[in-house]
Amino acid sequence: MDSLIGAKSLLIVAGDTSGDLHGARLIQELKSLRPDLYVAALGGKHMSVVADRFLFDLVALGAAGFAEPILRFFVWSRLLNVVRRYLDEKKPDGVITIDFYGFNHQVLGLAKHRKIPTFYYISPQVWASRPGRIQHLAKLVEHMIVIFPFEKDIYHGAGIPCTYVGHPLLDILPQPQPATNDQRPIPFKIGILPGSRPQEIHRHMPLFLEAYRKIQKELPSVQAYVFAAPQISDDFLKPYLRNGWKSISIVRESNYQLRSELDFALTSSGTATLENALLGIPMTVAYKLPWFTYWVARSIIRVPYIAMANILAGHRLVPELIQSDAVPEKVVEESLRQIKDVQGLANLRRNLLELRRVLGDPGASQRAAQLILEKLK
């Protein structure tokens, strides 16, 4: 690549677990293409390893929804002052934000005010709710880099320069296990994915554990694994597992190897549903919110599904149980209905794996890095 004209440093900001993972991959690709590039970051544990300077563990704060960020107003204010000081003192050549709209649109505003080039990698899901955000982003973002093919037309329609690079999960996920119509494997491996934030775990872990206990009575050969985000400690999870759950393993992995071997999953809504789908893992999706947040969300959500597998497919591939439907009895009913139909489970696995074709080819992180460096020349 031709030399950059004056571009020597970047500030990258991510605020959730998946953004941290993809942000770290982006930093690695940027440095691979431009070894002398200096990268400062706010993010999580993955970005802290690869950034030249790590300013704050934003992921560990774990705020989401509508009420929780308001309660953390003073924390956000202090962090924005950290960003403001960094921009004034170091004057980076570009700012890249990753998803996490509530905080990142303010970061973009600070950068725009200082005439620093701005990029948004992995856009907020404006197509799912609050489409008015697009017009606000049009004033702040110089280039939007998206990971779902349908997003490109949305941003182009709003006059925002936009490039679709494919989904970065395809750079990370191992090749999935082939679907078969054979008998159920023994042991039958079930993943429990309660979410990456403490509040999500508090709402979903008891639900999934109770459902698993009932499934185990029907199918004694099952084995469960709780998949934990890097910032969630064993000490945080163990109280949920102390009542006779010693046989359940806590798993943390960045290569998805054990996840790819699962036969089924009990999953809270979020990035985990897409990860499971791209690995061909059948699942039951459940999600519970504080009632205030739920009623606000219900009034603004514009898509018929919450699981990305269903959104991409355009129809219900996997069951979704939301709010008052997210109870152990219904999770068990939906899960056993799938698990007991061995051929149906194999067909579902094949249908989920078809979604890989929708998301382009591997190499999204590298394409995003190349685009950013080209724009900075």
Image (tube, rainbow, N blue to C red):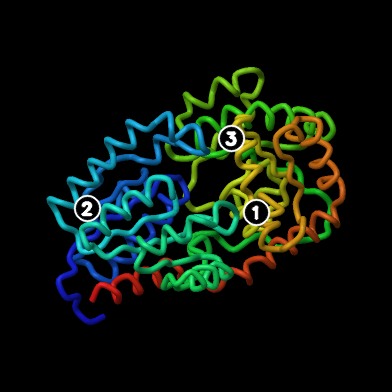
Instruction: Please name the residue shown 33% across and 59% down the image.
Output: 96
Q: Residues within 10 Å of mark 3 (few under 14, many from 20)?
A: some
Query: CA separation, marks 1 and 2?
Result: 40 Å
On the image, the x and y values in percent for residue 369 come to 35, 69
The single residue placed furthest to the top in the displayed view is: 243
* Circle number at residue 302: 1
Q: Amino acid at mark 3?
A: Thr
Residue 135 shown left or right of residue 85 in the figure: right
SS label for mark 1: loop
Instruction: For label 2, count other residues whose C-alpha is less than 10 Å away and answer few (under 14), some (14-19) or many (20+).
Output: some
Q: CA distance from mark 1 to mark 3?
A: 16 Å
Instruction: State if disc 3 and disc 1 touch (CB < 8 Å).
Output: no
Q: Residue at x 68, y 53 (%)?
A: 281
Q: CA distance from mark 2 to mark 3?
A: 37 Å
Q: In which quadrant is the N terminus drawn?
A: bottom left
Relative to 146, does residue 90 appear above or below in the rendering?
Answer: above
* Secondary structure state at the residue bearing disc 2: loop
Q: Nearer the viewer, residue 91 or 343?
A: 91
Task: Identify the residue position indicated by label 3 in the image.
Answer: 293
- Look at discs 2 and 3 and give the one toward the viewer: 3
**N-terminal label among 2 and 3:** 2
**Which amino acid, by three-letter code, is at mark 2?**
Asp
Q: Nearer the viewer, mark 1 or mark 2?
A: 1
Q: Secondary structure at mark 3?
A: helix
Q: Amino acid at mark 1?
A: Arg
Res 362 seen here: no
Q: Does 329 sit above or below residue 103? A: above
Answer with left or right where residue 28 lies relative to residue 134. left
Where residue 356 appears, as percent x and y from the top left, is 62, 67
Residue that badge 2 annotates:
52
Q: Is residue 210 visible?
A: yes
- Residue ranking furthest to the left: 89
